[in-house]
Image: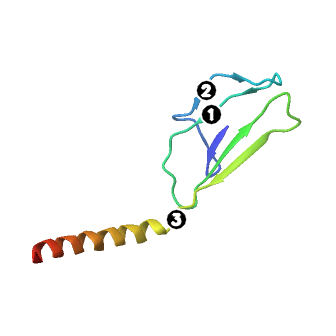
Amino acid sequence: MDTKNDVEVTEGVTLSCYYPNKDFTFTQYSTIPFTPQEGDVYSCTVEHKGLSEPETQLWEAEIEEKTAFYGAGLGLGLLGVGVGTSLS
């Protein structure tokens, strides 16, 4: 089961085929398309007879504030190129 902020996600979920491992276990991938937003928490829970209890993995979206800083730097850089070109 896949969730976003504790709400089950069913739309867009895809499961891969089974990939066998040398120890007679297998691997299968579950994927969902998403655009992370600051504070979103995603989880994937696996239930299987071979597990004593369901296993859950969490991922929390962290949007780096450096993106805004880089955008401002790029804007100033392009402004400098424009001014430099017009003065030449």
Q: Residue at x 89, y 36 (%)?
A: 52
Residue marked by disc 1: 30
| Quadrant containing the N terminus in the rendered view | top right
> In screen coordinates, is 87 left or right of 68?
left
Residue marked by disc 3: 64
Q: Are marks 2 and 1 in contact (CB under 8 Å)?
A: yes
User: Which residue is farthest bottom?
Assistant: 87
Q: Position of residue 26 (x, y in %)?
A: 75, 25
Residue type at tag 2: Ser
Q: Which callout, 3 or 2, points at the residue further toward the start of the chain?
A: 2
SS class, disc 3 = loop
- Disc number placed over residue 16 in the picture, else none: 2
Q: Position of residue 14 (x, y in %)?
A: 57, 30
Q: Which callout, 1 or 3, points at the residue further toward the start of the chain?
A: 1
SS class, disc 1 = strand
Residue type at tag 1: Ser
Q: Position of residue 18 (x, y in %)?
A: 68, 22
Q: How many marks?
A: 3
